[in-house]
Amino acid sequence: MTWVKETLRVNLLIVGLYGAVILSIFVRSGEPEYLWWWGLMIPFFLWCISPIFIPLVLARRSWLVSVGIALLAIVSLNQFIQNMFGEGVRSTSSLIFIFLPVYQWLAAAILLGIYFFMKSKTGQTDE
């Protein structure tokens, strides 16, 4: 059962690091000194971390999902950083926070579909 604990630790690490980087991007590119900004930022923050957090909760004992979601998080963070702070930053660059999670959800759905298909074929249970 130690691999289950290790998977949970890895999942918490993935979500924690991803959330911290997303929050730092928001703070660096936003106006955190105003209270109204935090009220608008929190829903976007939850939208941005949900494609990483929810698949890790649904398949919390799967190394396949953990590694796949970790790779998705790395690629996504690269896109967030390049769009917000890289060359060619435009006034519409912040739209990445609305549209990239849609593509993350698509990738996560494909990964979860593969995981649940493999799980059903091998007859594994979560117990």
Image (cartoon, grey):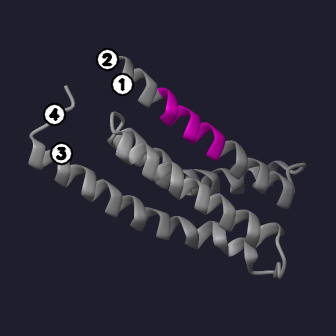
Q: CA distance from mark 2 to mark 3?
A: 18 Å
Amino acid identity at mark 3? Lys
**Which quarter of the rendered picture does the C terminus lie within?**
top left
Q: Residue at 74% across / 81% down in the picture?
A: 92
Q: Secondary structure at mark 3?
A: helix
Q: Residue at 41% across / 64% down in the picture?
A: 107
Q: Mark 3 or 1 closer to N-term?
A: 1
Q: Secondary structure at mark 1?
A: helix
| Quarter of the image where one finds residue 75 | bottom right
Amino acid identity at mark 2? Met
Tag 2 and tag 1, C-beta contact below 8 Å: yes
- What segment carries the magenta color? 9-18
Residue nearest the viewer, comparing 59 with 4: 4
- Is residue 7 visible to us here? yes
Q: CA distance from mark 2 to mark 1?
A: 5 Å
Q: CA distance from mark 4 to mark 3?
A: 8 Å
Point out which mark residue 1 bears.
2
Q: Mark 4 or 3 closer to N-term?
A: 3
Question: Does residue 88 sit above or below 111 in this rendering?
Answer: below
Percent across and percent down for residue 98 are 60, 69
Which residue does the numbered mark 4 point to in the structure image? Answer: 125
Q: Residue at 63% across / 46% down in the picture?
A: 18
Q: CA distance from mark 3 to mark 1?
A: 16 Å
